[in-house]
C-alpha cells in the first residue's frame, strides 16, 4: 500500500541499502570483481540472501576451478575450451534451454550455481569466473542476442557457447549468429571484450525486460533500474524509466520531480520531448488530487 508520499522505494535508506552501497563501491572500483557484483545483485533481488550464501557461491566457483584438469592449464585455447566444456557442460551440467528465459532465477548467479541452468550471459559468467580462477586468459563477448566466452587473444576468436554446454564456436559461427539476430554483418565493434560493468548492465537489462512483461513485478523493474544507475556508465534515459516506475508504484511526487529533472536535461537535446515529459510529470502530480 502507498499513499503517494513514499512507495516501496528500497532506495538509499530502505531495505538492501548496505548491499546497494557495496554494489556501487565495487562497480566504481579500479578493478571491479564480476562475481562479487553479480552476487551483490542477487542480495538486492532477494533480501533473504545472507553473506554466508554469497560466500557459498564463491566457494563453489573455487571448487569448480579446482576441478579443471592440470593438463589444460598452460595449454592452448582449444585445450581450455575442451576442458571446460567437459567439466562444466558435461560433468556439472551447466547449460540452458529456451524455457530459462522465462525464469528470473536464470539471471541470478547464486541460483544458476545451484540449478546449473541460466541465461547465456549468466552461464558465461560461471565459465569466466571458473576459467579465470584456474588461470585462463578468458573474456566475455556480448554479441547481439547472445553472450559467449572467448579465450586467448580476442583477435583470434577462440569462442565457446556455455548456453549450449560449451560448444566451440568459429568466427563463421559468430557471423551467422549475428546475422540471425540482426540481419546484418558482424561489425568489428561487436568483438570487443565486455567489461564487468557492461556485463552487469546487460544482466540488469535482461531483468528489466523480464519485469516489463509482468507489470505486477514493477518492484523488480525498480531495483534493476536503480542498480543500473549505480554503474559508472549507463543510458541517461534510465532516470526517466525510474521516474515512471515510481509513479506506477504510487510515489507520485518523487516520480514527478524526477521527470522534471530529466526534462531539464532533455531541454538541450530534444526540447519537444522535454515538454512531453513535463506534461507527464504534471499528470502524475494530478493523481494526488
Image: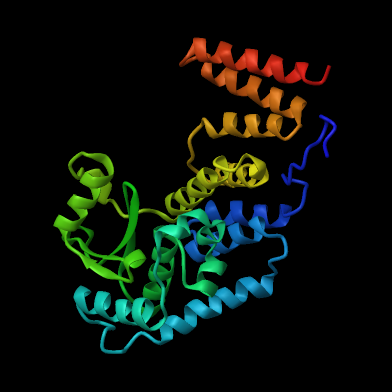
Q: Residue 44 at x, y = what percent?
A: 66, 56
Asked if one can make out residue 31 in the rendered structure from this viewpoint, the answer is no
Tell me if 95 is positioned left or right of 258 in this view: left
Tell me if 157 is positioned left or right of 241 in this view: left
Name the residue located 21 percent from the left edge and 73 percent from the top edge. Answer: 77
Q: Residue 16 at x, y = what percent?
A: 72, 55
Q: How is the image coloured?
A: rainbow
- Image quadrant containing the C terminus: top right
Q: Residue 183 at x, y = what percent?
A: 22, 39
Residue 90 occupies which quadrant of the picture? Answer: bottom left
In depth, the one of 267 and 201 nearer the eye is 201
Name the residue located 57 percent from the left edge and 45 percent from the top edge. Answer: 211
Residue 96 occupies which quadrant of the picture? Answer: bottom left
- Image quadrant containing the N terminus: top right
Q: Is residue 56 above or below residue 44?
A: below
Q: Residue furthest bottom?
A: 70
In depth, the one of 214 and 84 nearer the eye is 214
Q: Is residue 70 above or below residue 133?
A: below
Asked if one can make out residue 169 in the rendered structure from this viewpoint, the answer is yes
Q: Is residue 11 above or below residue 97?
A: above
Q: Residue 159 at x, y = what percent?
A: 24, 64
Name the residue located 81 percent from the left edge and 29 percent from the top edge. Answer: 4
In depth, the one of 269 and 172 nearer the eye is 172
Amino acid at each position: 500500500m502507498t499513499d503517494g508520499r513514499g512507495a516501496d522505494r528500497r532506495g538509499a535508506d530502505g531495505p538492501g541499502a548496505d548491499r546497494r552501497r557495496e554494489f556501487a563501491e565495487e562497480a566504481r572500483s579500479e578493478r571491479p570483481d564480476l562475481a562479487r557484483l553479480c552476487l551483490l545483485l542477487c542480495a538486492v533481488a532477494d533480501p533473504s540472501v545472507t553473506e554466508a550464501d554469497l560466500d557459498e557461491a564463491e566457494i563453489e566457483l573455487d571448487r569448480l576451478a579446482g576441478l579443471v584438469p592440470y593438463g589444460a592449464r598452460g595449454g592452448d585455447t582449444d585445450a581450455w575450451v575442451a576442458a571446460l566444456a567437459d567439466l562444466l557442460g558435461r560433468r556439472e551440467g551447466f547449460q540452458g534451454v529456451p524455457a530459462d528465459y522465462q525464469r528470473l532465477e536464470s539471471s541470478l548467479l547464486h541460483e544458476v550455481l545451484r540449478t546449473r541452468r541460466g541465461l547465456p550471459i549468466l552461464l558465461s559468467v560461471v565459465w569466466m569466473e571458473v576459467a579465470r580462477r584456474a588461470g585462463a586468459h578468458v573474456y566475455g563477448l556480448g554479441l547481439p542476442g547472445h553472450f559467449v566466452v572467448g579465450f586467448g587473444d580476442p583477435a583470434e576468436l577462440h569462442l565457446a557457447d556455455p548456453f549450449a554446454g560449451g560448444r566451440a564456436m568459429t568466427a563463421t559461427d559468430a557471423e551467422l549468429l549475428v546475422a540471425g539476430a540482426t540481419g546484418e554483418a558482424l561489425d568489428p565493434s561487436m568483438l570487443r571484450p565486455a567489461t564487468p560493468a557492461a556485463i552487469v548492465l546487460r544482466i540488469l537489462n535482461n531483468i528489466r525486460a523480464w519485469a516489463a512483461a509482468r507489470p505486477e513485478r514493477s518492484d523488480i523493474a525498480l531495483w534493476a533500474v536503480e542498480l543500473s544507475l549505480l554503474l559508472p556508465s549507463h543510458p541517461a534515459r534510465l532516470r526517466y524509466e525510474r521516474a515512471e516506475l515510481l509513479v506506477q508504484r504510487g510515489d507520485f511526487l518523487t516520480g514527478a520531480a524526477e521527470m522534471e529533472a530529466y526534462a531539464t536535461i532533455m531541454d538541450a537535446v530534444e526540447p519537444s520531448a522535454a515538454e512531453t515529459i513535463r506534461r507527464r510529470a504534471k499528470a502524475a502530480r494530478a493523481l494526488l488530487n
